[in-house]
Image (cartoon, grey):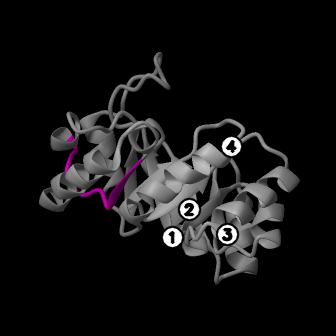
Amino acid sequence: MFVAITKNKYLSKKDIMHYLAIESHIDYLIVRTPMTSDELVNWINLLVQYHFPKKKIIIHENIDVLMRCELTAIHFKALNNQDLFIKQRFPHIQVSKSTHTSDAIAEAERRNLDFVLFSHIFETNSKPNCLPRTANEIEAALQYSIPVVALGGINHRTMSDLPSGFKGIAGISLFEKNSVPFLERLKEVWKSYV
């Protein structure tokens, strides 16, 4: 599973063109942005008009946009507990969550969430003062049946160091800054990983 995450910025038509170009190389796009609900609805509707599959769009925490755009997936921050409400009230909605501990993964599994992001695996420029997860933390995180997707510092150099057991990789710059040929090569590396 390859999960692209938008940069936390105001998204433009240029971003739409980029995600359209890489769409066949990703399974999901988490739309995480400071835009208002109205702006997000307009951007997502334009993305879909350009034939980006709606089933690949995961809205980040915005239930209003989830409903107005008739999306089928939502992602929550680690400390946001609305995931339980959404999963109970709308069982057809795919719900995922960010996690940083094995206890949080266990709770996500108890809540029947669809998958979790676990971060951060390697050193990353976006978290310069945070140490990556230890080997013991990663091993504990991978003991559950819920799919665990690796996030943080993943690139073509670190992929070979990724501990086995992850069901996918996620990233912001990994999918934002790289070309289609790079993502094709990354998919080949991933196939040898799983």
Mark positioned earlier in the residue sequence (3 or 4) = 4
Nearest the viewer among 43 and 109 is 43
Label 3 and label 4: CA atoms lie apart by: 16 Å
> Quick one: SS at disc 2?
strand
Q: Which segment is the magenta one?
A: 162-170
> Quick one: SS at disc 3?
helix
User: Circle 4 is placed at which residue position?
Assistant: 11
Asked whether the viewer can see residue 74, the reply is no
Q: Say few, some or many: other residues with alpha carbon within 10 Å of mark 3 (under 14 / 14 to 19 / 20 or more).
A: few
Q: Is residue 146 left or right of residue 11?
A: left
Which image quarter: residue 125?
top left
Give the residue type at disc 1.
Asp
Disc 3 versus disc 2: nearer the observer: 3
Label for residue 114?
1
Q: Is residue 125 left or right of residue 52?
A: left
Label for residue 127?
none
Above or below residue 62? Residue 55 is below
Above or below residue 77? Residue 120 is above
User: Circle 3 is placed at which residue position?
Assistant: 49
Mark positioned earlier in the residue sequence (3 or 2) = 3
Q: Which residue is at a point 60% across and 52% down the rendered structure image? A: 16
Magenta span: helix, strand or loop, mainly?
A: loop
Q: Which quarter of the figure is the N terminus placed in?
A: bottom left
Q: Residue furthest bottom?
A: 92
Mark positioned earlier in the residue sequence (1 or 3) = 3
Mark positioned earlier in the residue sequence (4 or 1) = 4
Q: Say few, some or many: other residues with alpha carbon within 10 Å of mark 2 (under 14 / 14 to 19 / 20 or more).
A: many
Question: Would you say the residues marked 4 and 1 are in contact, meaning their CB atoms lie under 8 Å apart?
Answer: no
